[in-house]
Amino acid sequence: MAVRAQKDTRFAKVLDALLTAPTTPQGTLEQIAARTLSDQRRAALVEDFVDGSLRTPEVQALLKLRTPQAVHRLRSRGKLIGSAVGNQTWFPCLATR
């Protein structure tokens, strides 16, 4: 485990959470491990989504729209699919970059 923890920071964080978890009964340890695993899975999904998506300026250029607001207007009307991640809106694309 020590070797893996040195190479895999996510694994090290899970181990750290387990080691610092309270040892009282009632499933506290399982809840902490499950929450940590869930957070890691969510972060990986968000990263995959962002990696396969275009930012608003890229969509604007691709669709030859004059303003970023035009992109968001299409999104609000259901013509484009996009999701906010942080303060940036990402639009999934089917084509590879």
Image (cartoon, helix red, strand yellow):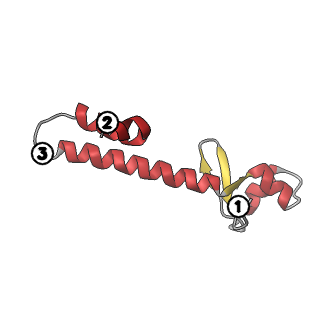
Left or right, 68 with respect to 20, comes to right
Q: Residue at x 59, y 56 (%)?
A: 49
- The location of residue 77, given as percent across then percent down, is 71, 65
Left or right, 14 with respect to 26, comes to right
Q: Which structural element holds mark 1? A: helix
- Which numbered disc flags the more N-terminal residue, 1 or 2? 2
Left or right, 7 with respect to 81, comes to left
Q: Residue furthest front?
A: 3
Disc number for residue 2: 2
Q: Which quadrant of the view contains residue 21?
A: top left
The reply to whether callout 3 and callout 2 are in contact (CB within 8 Å) is: no
Disc number for residue 26: 3
- The location of residue 79, given as percent across then percent down, is 72, 68
- The location of residue 53, given as percent across then percent down, is 67, 56
The reply to whether callout 1 and callout 2 are in contact (CB within 8 Å) is: no
Q: Nearer the viewer, mark 1 or mark 2?
A: 2
